Image (cartoon, rainbow, N blue to C red):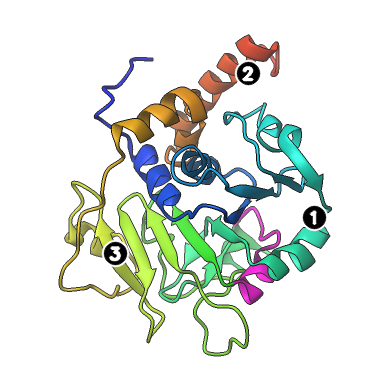
């Protein structure tokens, strides 16, 4: 692996940095399963501007203040080994999270103009879908009552940004709400977005360096609210890049969410091999 100059950055590092900037010191944040971009963003915040950050994790249902570097086969070290308290999943989703209004980032399989989103299936019917998604976990509970929901989409495209969902598992800005509110913010690999206060529709906040407005419009399956003046996303600082590469995620687990197909598989194998050297065999030798 060739080291990149510290003043260069990858798209996963830009997304992680944007996630980090949404975190305030002293907050309690929620960490889902298989979301390394979010985990890296939380840890980057903790090691820079939010040292008093605490975590509620779906991995082991743990509450943590300490931290560990991100891994794949060793991901439990990040949460379970740092746990101050463990609570079963049902209690976390139905009691703890709604009561404490934890800030949490969700990755939607589909998202509509109002921040409603889908993690159940795409195409077909619920019983016979074209593509079955991972599922909603505690998302229906948290998004109905929560006030601090955030979204992220590592690969921005019309297949994700849709006019109408195939299934709604997370509620956005809906006139029928009696409690809670829709998402505050969405980060993708093309830009940053929020939701217009009056209409609840998704609005462009900033374009990532090198990304044009025309490209975002072409990659989005509905009309966005477009301000007159759209700034450029501020890139990661050399300090933030150094922390990510050397301390928080030296294995590069965060990049798995921005890769697909053979590139993702190749990167996953590289990570597992590196972890195996550090911890002993953790996968079959024939897995290549």
Q: What is the CA distance from the residue labelled 1 to the residue labelled 2?
A: 32 Å
Residue range corresponding to the magenta coloring: 132-146
Chain-order first, disc 1 or disc 3: 1
| Horizontal side of residue 170 vs 202, given as left or right | right
The residue shown at (54%, 22%) is 271
Q: Quadrant of residue 28?
A: bottom right
- Vertical placement of 200 versus 143: above or below? below
The residue shown at (38%, 78%) is 201
Q: What is the CA distance from the residue labelled 1 to the residue labelled 3?
A: 35 Å
Answer whether labels 1 and 2 touch (C-beta < 8 Å).
Answer: no
Query: Residue 165 in the image: x percent, y percent?
Result: 51, 72
Q: Secondary structure at mark 3?
A: strand
Which residue bears the numbered disc 1? 89
- Vertical placement of 63 versus 80: above or below? below
Which quadrant does the N terminus fall into?
Answer: top left
The residue shown at (63%, 12%) is 278
Question: Residue 122: in sight, yes or no?
Answer: yes
Eye-nearest disc, 3 or 2:
3
- Vertical placement of 178 versus 270: above or below? below
Q: Which mark is residue 287?
A: 2
Query: Residue 191 in the image: x percent, y percent?
Result: 30, 56
Q: Quadrant of residue 81?
A: top right
The residue shown at (61%, 18%) is 275
Q: Residues within 10 Å of mark 2 (few under 14, many from 20)?
A: few
Is residue 131 shown in magenta? no
Which residue bears the numbered disc 3? 205
């Amino acid at each position: 692996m060739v080291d990149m100059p510290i003043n260069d950055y990858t798209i996963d590092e830009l997304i992680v940095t944007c996630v980090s900037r949404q975190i305030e010191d002293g907050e309690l944040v929620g960490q889902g399963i298989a979301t390394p971009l979010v985990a890296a963003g939380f840890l980057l915040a903790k090691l820079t501007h939010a040292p008093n950050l605490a975590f509620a994790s779906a991995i082991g249902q743990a509450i943590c203040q300490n931290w560990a570097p991100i891994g794949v086969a060793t991901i439990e070290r990040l949460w379970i080994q740092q746990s101050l308290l463990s609570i079963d999943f049902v209690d976390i989703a139905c009691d703890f999270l709604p009561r404490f209004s934890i800030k949490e980032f969700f990755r939607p399989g589909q998202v509509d103009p109002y921040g409603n989103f889908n993690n159940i299936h795409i195409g077909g019917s619920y019983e016979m879908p074209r593509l079955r998604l991972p599922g909603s976990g505690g998302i229906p509970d948290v998004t109905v009552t929560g006030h601090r929901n955030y979204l992220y989409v590592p690969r921005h495209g019309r297949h994700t940004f849709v006019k109408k969902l195939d299934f709604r598992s997370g509620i956005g800005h809906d006139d029928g709400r009696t409690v809670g509110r829709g998402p505050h913010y969405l980060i993708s690999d093309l830009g940053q977005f929020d939701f217009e206060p009056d209409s609840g529709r998704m609005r462009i906040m900033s374009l990532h360096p090198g990304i044009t407005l025309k490209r975002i419009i072409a990659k989005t399956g509905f009309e966005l609210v477009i301000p007159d003046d759209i700034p450029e996303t501020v890139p990661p600082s050399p300090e933030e890049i150094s922390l990510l590469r050397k301390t928080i995620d030296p294995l590069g687990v965060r990049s798995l969410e921005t890769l697909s197909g053979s590139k993702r598989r190749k990167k996953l194998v590289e990570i597992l091999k590196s972890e195996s050297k550090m911890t002993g065999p953790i996968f079959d030798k024939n897995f290549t």
